Image (cartoon, rainbow, N blue to C red):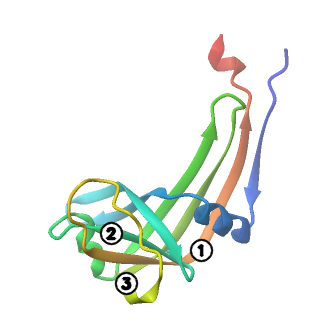
């Protein structure tokens, strides 16, 4: 049996739609203590990716303008079809008055700080991978 797979780039507009379709992603940035990658619950408000965090947390440091990457993906293990989107941008404080919908915190506890990621670029790809080589 011949293995079949494909990898297709996604247009930036498709990437934006996919980011809007989910509620959890990962924020990555270079901190003073090294590379950080943390999961967050988020919403998209007027093109800005918005998440909440706690005072004193690693993520709270992103109220200062910081270059970040934000990744969202999906994989259906049964069909072996998925996609991955990467948004690159800069963070800034976000005000609750800027949107009607705020993200619900994923982790328990008080998360009063709102941070927005202002994307400057979206890239992504869709993937279909034949997993027969992994099943042998």
Q: Nearer the viewer, mark 3 or mark 2?
A: 3
Is residue 78 rendered to the left or right of residue 45? right
CA neighbours of label 1 inside 10 A, class few (<14), some (14 to 19), many (20+): few
Is residue 100 rendered to the left or right of residue 14? left
107 or 64: which is nearer to us? 107
**On the rendered image, what quadrant is the C terminus found in?**
top right
Q: Who comes first in sequence, dot 1 or dot 3?
A: 3
Q: Who comes first in sequence, dot 3 or dot 2?
A: 2
Q: Position of residue 27 (x, y in %)?
A: 40, 61
Q: Height in image: 27 above or below 84?
A: below
Q: Position of residue 20 (x, y in %)?
A: 60, 66
At 17% from the left edge and 70% from the top edge, which residue is drawn? 55
The residue pinned by badge 1 equals 121
At 72% from the left edge and 65% from the top edge, which residue is drawn? 14
Q: Judging from the image, what secondary structure is the residue with disc 2 in?
A: strand
Q: Position of residue 54 (x, y in %)?
A: 21, 67
Q: Height in image: 133 above or below 18?
A: above
Q: Position of residue 39 (x, y in %)?
A: 38, 54
Is residue 42 rendered to the left or right of residue 52? right
CA neighbours of label 3 inside 10 A, class few (<14), some (14 to 19), many (20+): few
Q: Nearer the viewer, mark 1 or mark 2?
A: 2
At 31% from the left edge and 57% from the top edge, which residue is drawn? 36
Q: Judging from the image, what secondary structure is the residue with disc 3 in?
A: helix
The residue pinned by badge 2 equals 52
* Residue farthest right in this picture: 1
Q: Judging from the image, what secondary structure is the residue with disc 1 in?
A: strand
Q: Height in image: 111 above or below 4?
A: below
Is residue 27 rendered to the left or right of residue 135? left
38 or 32: which is nearer to us? 38
* Residue farthest left in this picture: 56
Tell me whether circle 3 and circle 2 mark residues in contact (CB < 8 Å): no
The residue pinned by badge 3 equals 96
């Amino acid at each position: 049996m011949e293995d079949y797979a494909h990898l297709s780039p996604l247009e930036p507009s498709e990437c934006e739609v996919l980011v809007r379709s989910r509620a959890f992603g990962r924020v990555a940035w270079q901190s003073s203590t090294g590379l950080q990658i943390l999961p967050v619950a988020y919403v998209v408000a007027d093109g800005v990716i918005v998440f909440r965090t706690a005072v004193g947390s690693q993520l709270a440091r992103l109220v200062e303008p910081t270059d970040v990457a934000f990744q969202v993906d999906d994989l259906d293990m049964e069909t072996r079809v998925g996609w991955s989107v990467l948004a690159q941008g800069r963070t800034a404080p976000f005000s609750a008055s800027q949107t009607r919908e705020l993200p619900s915190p994923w982790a328990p506890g008080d998360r009063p700080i709102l941070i927005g990621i202002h994307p400057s670029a979206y890239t992504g790809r869709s993937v279909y991978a034949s997993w027969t080589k992994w099943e042998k």
